[in-house]
């Protein structure tokens, strides 16, 4: 039992460094075998500055994988706590890498998402927490999604582009 606890702590600290870990390490830490689709799609997320939609992944992989493979891969990543879903104004969904201690079956992505009216990039604002909502008696809380729209940092001040992050 004690050994098991230590093991799961190791996985969590690994996920904190998700953005910088190697693809193989992330898949291994989540007990996933390394397949072409998993490798390629995870790499896309690591190299993307914003969230990705299913169609973005299809386009960026030049139809290397069929729709079902992409869908299953995304679903596996969501189940494992590697990526999380972001609702969009047109009722579709986007995906972004988890940076918190998300794990199999539980997510803690309690941050606001921002969509830029100009460049249409969807950002995870990791440090902007979703405010708690007080529900009336009898209502049970599941989840809050907050999507803020406006002009992103890059579009607002193009001259800062080279110096950001
Ligand atoms: Zn997550
Ligand atoms: Zn923008
Ligand atoms: Zn996010």
Image (cartoon, rainbow, N blue to C red):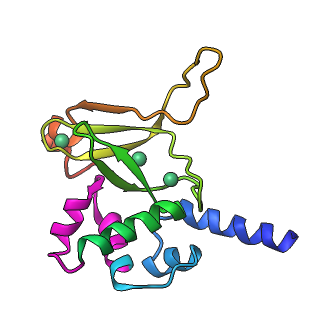
Image x and y of residue 148, in percent: 31, 31
Q: Residue at image x 55%, y 63%? A: 15
Residue shown at the point (60%, 14%) measured from the top left = 136
Q: Residue furthest top?
A: 136
Please say whether residue 43 is one of the residues in the magenta stretch: yes
- Residue placed furthest toward the right: 2
Q: In the image, what residue occupies the spot 29% across and 68% down?
A: 44
Position of residue 5 relative to residue 95, above or below, is below
Nearer to us in this view, 127 or 162? 127
* Quadrant of picture, ligand 2: top left
Tell me which residue sits at (27%, 41%) in the image: 91
Where is residue 16? Give x, y as percent: 55, 60
The image quadrant where one finds the N terminus is bottom right
Specify the segment rendered in magenta: 39-65
Residue 88 pos. (x, y %): 28, 41
Residue 19 in sight from this viewpoint: no
């Amino acid at each position: 039992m004690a050994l098991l606890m230590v093991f799961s702590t190791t996985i969590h600290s690994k996920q904190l460094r998700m953005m910088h870990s190697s693809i193989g390490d992330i898949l291994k830490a989540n007990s996933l075998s390394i397949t072409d689709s998993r490798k390629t799609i995870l790499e896309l997320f690591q190299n993307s500055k914003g969230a990705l939609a299913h169609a973005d992944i299809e386009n960026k992989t030049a139809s290397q994988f069929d729709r079902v493979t992409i869908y299953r891969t995304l679903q596996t990543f969501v189940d494992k706590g590697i990526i999380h879903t972001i609702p969009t104004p047109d009722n579709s969904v986007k995906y972004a890498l988890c940076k918190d201690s998300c794990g199999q079956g539980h997510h803690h992505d309690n941050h606001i998402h921002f969509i830029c009216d100009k460049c249409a990039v969807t950002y995870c604002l990791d440090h902007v927490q979703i405010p708690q909502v007080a529900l009336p008696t009898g209502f049970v809380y599941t989840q809050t999604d907050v999507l803020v729209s406006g002009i992103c940092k890059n579009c607002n001040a193009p001259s800062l582009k080279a110096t950001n992050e």
